[in-house]
Amino acid sequence: MLALKRLNKFYTKSYEKAPFKTLCVTNGCLAVISDVTAQTITYYNWQASTKNEAVNLDEKLPEKLQEHEELKPRPPPRFDPYRTLRFALYNVAVAPLVGKWFMFLEKRFPMSTVQQAAGGWLKHNDKTTLKRMITDQTLFAPMSLSLFFTVMGLVETGSIEGVQAKFKDAYLPAIKANYQLWPAVQLINFKFVPLPYRLPVVSTVGIAWNSYLSWLNNAAKEEEIATHKFEEEERQYDGTRGEQIKLEI
């Protein structure tokens, strides 16, 4: 408890002196935790699936040998520090934008501080909280996800096609998952959490969310690589087959 009080005091002073710098550092650190968590989960999923494949290997081996198929174990996923760095830098860069957005919502939909008869101030504040959440989720959430997949697509592939592949493979699952989690989180955040702590709260809850986003972004990247490899092999096969037909003629 004492450590948490000291951390809270340090954060409050830091936010008062340099709010956006504080948000950037906080968001960047939590992004590192998120991506490391995502990569760790990916590794343990690989480990579990490898064990399951080993259990069934005796049953599959004769069939595979009869079909003359080569059995190749999937290599373990390696930790990618550059992926973590990209994810952290992105979250550092967008922290001021998110901070400004929360400030805008605070001013645009102010809470009432004057108690009115029959609990009218509570009703007003509940409506204000709902307005903040709806505005956040209808405007900022889709925009922030679009920005994330656009930036990651450009950084990782350097092409518009890469961005389009990100949106095709990952955007719809991400927006669906967003609306299953964040409306409830933001209702609590806007209702009970003071402005300086809203982004850290989002980032803390976002450890799980960003782990999912990081995993989803990487899954889309692997899907794109696999598709490109398949198309390349198909072109090579068509070219080889064409040469064989010419020789036969």
Image: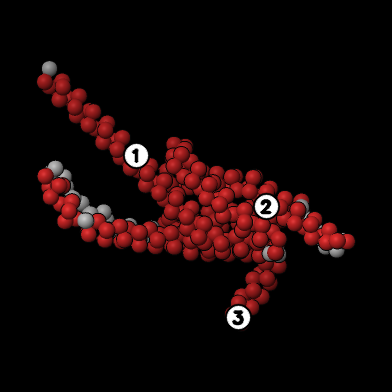
The amino acid beneath tag 2 is Met
C-alpha separation, residue under disc 2 versus residue under disc 3:
31 Å
Task: Calculate the distance from the C-alpha at mark 1 to the C-alpha at mark 2.
Answer: 39 Å
Q: Measured along the vertical axis of the image, is residue 29 above or below residue 129?
A: below
The quarter holding residue 120 reads: bottom right
Residue 149 against residue 203 in the figure, above or below: above
The percent coordinates of residue 32 (x first, y second) are: 48, 62
Residue closer to the observer: 72 or 184: 184
Residue at point 30% right, 57% down? 49
Contact, mark 1 vs mark 3 (Cβ under 8 Å): no
Residue 234 can be seen in this image: yes
| Relative side of 196 to 153, left or right | right
User: Which of disc 3 and disc 2 is earlier in sequence?
Assistant: 3
Q: Is residue 63 left or right of residue 171?
A: left
The mark closer to the camera, 1 or 2, is 2
Relative side of 161 to 16, left or right = left
The circle drawn on residue 1 is: 3
Q: If you read the primary sequence from the N terminus, does the residue marked by circle 1 or circle 2 appear first?
A: 2
Quadrant in which the C terminus appears: top left
Q: Amino acid at mark 3?
A: Met
**Residue 227: image tag:** 1
Asked whether, in this view, residue 157 is left or right of residue 127, the answer is: left
Q: Can you see residue 148?
A: no
Discs 2/3, front = 2
Q: Residue furthest top?
A: 249
Q: Which residue is mark 2?
A: 133
| Numbered disc 3: secondary structure | loop
Secondary structure, mark 2, is helix
Label 1 is placed on what type of residue?
Thr
Residue at the image position 29 percent from the left and 35 percent from the top: 232
